[in-house]
Amino acid sequence: MQGKRIVVTRAWHQAKELSSLLTQHGAEALLYPCIAIVPPEDTRQLDRVLREMAAGAFDWLVLTSANAVTVLSQRLETMGLLTPSGLALACVGPATAEAAQRLLGMQASVIPEEYVAEALVELIKPVLPARVLLLQAEKARPVLREQLAAAGATITTQVTYRTVQGEGGVHLSTLLQEQQVDAITFTSASTVANCVRRLQAEGADLSLLTHVCLACIGPVTAQAIQNMGLIVGVMPAEHTIEGLVAELETYFSERKSALCLR
């Protein structure tokens, strides 16, 4: 990927890992944060549920993103609470599990091989019925809550954070017009939606996105791209930041080889 200019749409506080990996592979990372992560406007309901958790009201804690871990850690520290020792943890992927270990001191008992909600449900089913606390985003898909409940969980779902539109970074519409972008990375459906909104606010023609590789971390993000009428250029089999960068490396290597054969 030497010299390739690749846009990172993650929030400012999340962009470092992906940017560093891209740089290590010889690419230039262009920051264009399309999301920002903030707590709920009113945290009283969240705080009440966390007090119940600390008091042992749940058997399992289910976390679907590192963002939920970050806000959970902040609220627990603010209230002077700890997670109970008997609380089992399920995480949708290794990045969430790593954040839980680092910020909460909790080791995940369950991490699915495929980092999507549906796979997580299948792993939790054998321990049900159980009291499950699901902490997730304000606009999270209902599939995890619905399937856990259908499988026998006594489920409590709590909004832990909101995803709002990000700001700052490069002026992407200008770079696209000047053909100065090789790929744009998306790590959630919200990065896709807010990227489109930001470009429209900049007066950009969305057809410019057809001339660059749109790289998605997983199937939910890829579906968001397709819903916009756009084409997914890259989606790794392993839905991680490392997998995304490796797949981009392969994509550009194959394109280079194809050009050399002409």
Image (cartoon, rainbow, N blue to C red):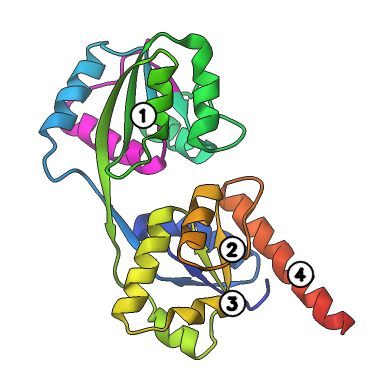
Discs 2/4, front: 2
* Mark closer to the chain start, 1 or 4: 1
Q: Quadrant of residue 213?
A: bottom right
* Mark closer to the chain start, 3 or 4: 3
Residue bearing the label numbered 1: 104
Q: Quadrant of residue 113?
A: top right
Residue extending farthest right: 261
Discs 2/3, front: 2
Q: Residue at x 38, y 81 (%)?
A: 171
Discs 1/4, front: 4
Q: Is residue 71 magenta?
A: yes
Q: Helix or strand or loop: what does disc 2 sit on?
A: loop
Distance from the alpha carbon under mark 3 to that under mark 4: 13 Å
Image position, residue 107 (x, y; %): 47, 23
* Mark closer to the chain start, 1 or 3: 1
Whether residue 137 is visible: yes
Residue bearing the label numbered 2: 232
Dot 1 amino acid type: Leu
Residue bearing the label numbered 3: 182
Dot 3 amino acid type: Asp
Residue bearing the label numbered 4: 253
